[in-house]
Image (tube, rainbow, N blue to C red):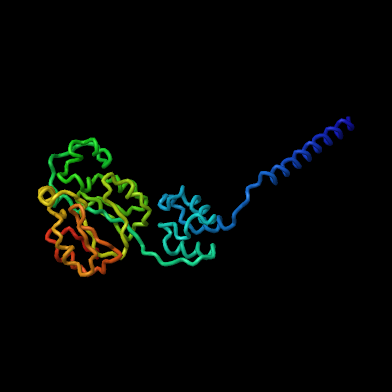
Amino acid sequence: MITGIITAAVLVGGTGLVIGLLLGLAGKKFAVEVNEKEIAVRQQLPGNNCGGCGYPGCDGLAAAIAAGQAPVNGCPVGGPAAAKAIGAIMGQEVSETRRMVAFVKCGGDCEHSRKNYVYDGVEDCAVMAYIPGGGAKACTHGCLGYGTCVKACTFGALHIVEGVAVADPEACKACGKCVSACPRHLIEMVPFDQRYLVRCSSSDRGKTTMNACQAGCIGCRKCEKGCPVGAVHVENNVAHIDYDKCTNCGKCRENCPRGCIFRKE
């Protein structure tokens, strides 16, 4: 009986020893190398996994930065602080970049825009493509006001105010989700310190725009002619500001007869 117990113990022990050796060898053969820089970089990222960097979440960006495939300032949410910390990890100097925020290029709120009919249905901007006229508003270029961008924003930076989406520059992290969500492509990223912005995207001729919205750009070029540094140009019947040239003097707003150039306080 004792011999049987000893034999069983030897067999079990021997089997365990063999399995342990095999597992050890397999662990070495199939071991995944840990990139210490990747881990360190990941710890500096905010963890929102918003995809604003163009990579599949913060893990994807950390791996790309560690591999030298993405810039150290690739996270728009982390901003300069995260870029500086990651730059130190990667041994790179980080050049200063302008903070960017979302801006909705439409001022056609309930007071200024005209409606063709009263809409009572699913409140989603993407659905409006299947609605007669592309929605109730007479302007076919402006904000539909049903908040698809608001739903897409994970930082609470967008709100519907009087029928138009408005971005809060203080809360915006420039992840870009709202830009992708807007079916009319009305949202763009602008410099945080930019004070004057054109709040219109209509490419219609002046008369058509005037009939649809009291705050729409009619392409009169008064802003363009009044800009002392050549930062304003009218293209496709709507004014555009070159933020690299603009000095925020405000002349364009003073000359605009329609009030479609917004001044950010």
> Left of 27 or right of it: where is 262?
left
> Left of 144 or right of it: where is 48?
right
Residue at the spot 23% in from the left edge and 58% down from the top edge: 240
Asked if 126 appears above or below 191 in the picture, the reply is: above
Along the line of sight, the residue nearer the viewer: 109 or 182: 182
Residue 194 quadrant:
bottom left
Residue 134 quadrant:
top left
> Left of 204 or right of it: where is 103?
right
Along the line of sight, the residue nearer the viewer: 203 or 40: 203
Asked if 184 appears above or below 239 in the picture, the reply is: above
Residue at the spot 57% in from the left edge and 58% down from the top edge: 37
Asked if 260 appears above or below 27 in the picture, the reply is: below
The C terminus lies in quadrant: bottom left
Residue at the spot 73% in from the left edge and 43% down from the top edge: 25
The N terminus lies in quadrant: top right
> Left of 15 or right of it: where is 118?
left
Q: How many marks?
A: 0
Along the line of sight, the residue nearer the viewer: 57 or 188: 188
* Position in image of residue 99 (x %, y %): 36, 62
* Position in image of residue 258 (x %, y %): 13, 58
* Position in image of residue 8 (x %, y %): 83, 32
Residue at the spot 26% in from the left edge and 69% down from the top edge: 247
* Position in image of residue 222 (x %, y %): 14, 62
Asked if 233 appears above or below 127 in the picture, the reply is: below
